[in-house]
Amino acid sequence: MELSSLDKAELHVHLEGSVTPETLQEIEPKLSLEEIRSHYRYENFLGFLQSYKWVNLHLKAPEHFGLITRRLLEDLARQGVRYAEVNVSAGVVLWRGMELGPVFDAIALAAQEGPIPVRFIFDAVRQFGLEHVWSVARAAVGLKDRGVVGFGVGGDEAGGPVEQFREVFDYARANGLRLAPHAGETVGPASVWAALECGAERIGHGIRSIEDPVLVAHLRDRNIPLEVSISSNVCTGAVGSLKEHPVRRLYDAGVPIILNTDDPPMFHTTLIKEYEIARDEFGFGEADLRTVAENGFRFAFGPVPGFPFNS
Ligand SMILES: [Zn+2]
């Protein structure tokens, strides 16, 4: 089976983490490719967050966001992606004091003109605190008629336990948004349980769920998918090595798995490469890969044309 011709969905990719070194140099010509590439390597998760912030700080104008949206969607379409939900670090935009309106206008216009249907998930930075998380949720609700379908929190999991944002999640859900926080990436099962108690419908990463058999059974029985990004977890040190990654054990335990890239050039990967890793390193056969690909449509928050079981 050609993985490029397998219909796939990408449900966990960060717009600002999808900027290739070449595109960043186009935006900021005084940076050399070597310098940019040196920022695309990390010792640990906090090192990655520093680099992610560094890339963000070079996106200075709405047209930069438009450009990176176009490039991302073109790249996904080339890989056989038929539908995408793109995480936008709206929290970082607000934190930088930029106006979110023009930035989102540029993103939405690029999406409208792009080759595949796309919806957006707004991410807040959990360690920036409650008021910040509220501001992102309000912004997401305000833009829900323009393609924002979900709300989540990312950043330093240890520095921002999700339970403190419970009311924000309640507000987002009551206003029609779906919930997909990051959890169980660098912190253990308690973080995933807390996300579920806050109403999470999909879990960003969630790989450390494997440490709690009761949680694994819960995810399976409630049909709650994990957005798994294998290369991301290896690059940030969330897992000690590729071999230790629990994707196969979670899949075999019946937990719905979706494969994603998270921040593809920053983790030196593509969606096709993530499927190849599942196949070559974890023994996912053709039927398994089809199941995983179908999960990307089944668990999408937005309506996916041609996939009736989702809408
Ligand atoms: Zn992520």
Image (cartoon, rainbow, N blue to C red):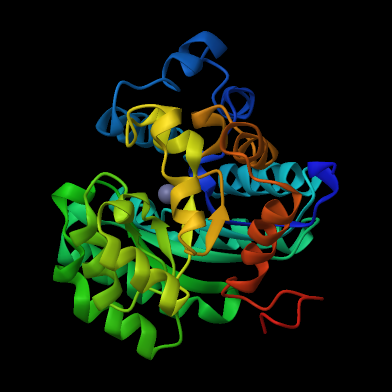
Q: Position of residue 6 (x, y in %)?
A: 81, 52
Q: Left or right of 31: which side holds 81?
A: right
At a point 41% along the width and 28% down the height, the residue shown is 235
In-front residue for pair 80/35: 80
Would residue 178 be visible to someone looking at this image?
no
Residue 25 visible to an observer of this rendering: yes
Image spot of residue 147 (x, y percent): 59, 73
Q: How many marks?
A: 0
Q: Position of residue 259 (x, y in %)?
A: 57, 51
Q: Quadrant of residue 302?
A: bottom right
Q: Nearer the viewer, residue 159 or 37?
A: 159
Q: Is residue 89 left or right of residue 15?
A: left
Instruction: Name the residue: 52% across, 15% down.
Output: 30
Q: Is residue 48 above or below residue 148?
A: above
In the image, residue 31 sits, relative to residue 96, either above or below, namely above
Name the residue: 14% across, 49% down: 159
Q: Quadrant of the C terminus?
A: bottom right
Instruction: State the quadrant of the N terminus.
Output: top right
The image quarter in which residue 218 lies = bottom left
Residue lying farthest to the bottom in this orientation: 174
Percent from the top left, x then y, of residue 108?
63, 63
In depth, the one of 225 and 162 nearer the eye is: 225
